[in-house]
Image (cartoon, grey):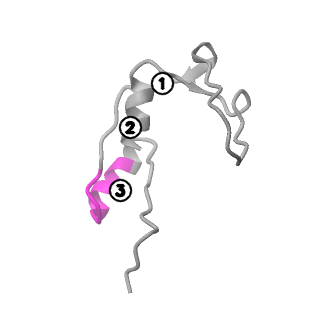
Amino acid sequence: MDYAFDYIKDDHPLMLEAKYPYTAKKGSCHYEKSEGMGKIRGYKDVRAHDGDQLRAAVEKGPVSIAVEADKSIF
């Protein structure tokens, strides 16, 4: 996620889904900077397993969550 946030922050605004819909198949990038609308000023990572820090982040703004689904906890 950090790479994506850096890309957006570094002058590559997000396109609206209506302009760049998800197709669920292999293909080429069709990004058009002139169609970009969404920007970010920055982001912060929250420590893993830190509920207090996560609650504070949720109160401040949007939160992205990564799930490491390739590991078993059992």
Mark drawn on residue 39? 1
Tell me if mark 2 has few (under 14), some (14-19) or many (20+) residues whose alpha carbon lies within 10 angstroms of its own. few
Q: Residue furthest front?
A: 27
N-terminal of the pair, mark 3 or mark 2, is 2
Compared to residue 40, the image places residue 43 above or below, namely below
* Mark 3 vs mark 1: in front: 1
Which secondary structure, mark 1? loop
Q: Position of residue 6 (x, y in %)?
A: 37, 31
Residue shown at 68% from the left, 34% from the top: 17
N-terminal of the pair, mark 3 or mark 1, is 1
Q: Which residue is mark 3?
A: 55
Q: Position of residue 36 (x, y in %)?
A: 59, 20
Which secondary structure, mark 2? helix
* Mark 1 vs mark 2: in front: 2
Quadrant in the picture for the C terminus: bottom left
Report the span colored magenta.
Answer: 46-57
Q: Which residue is mark 2?
A: 3
Q: Position of residue 15 (x, y in %)?
A: 61, 26
N-terminal of the pair, mark 1 or mark 2, is 2
* Mark 3 vs mark 2: in front: 2
State the residue in front, 50 or 11.
11
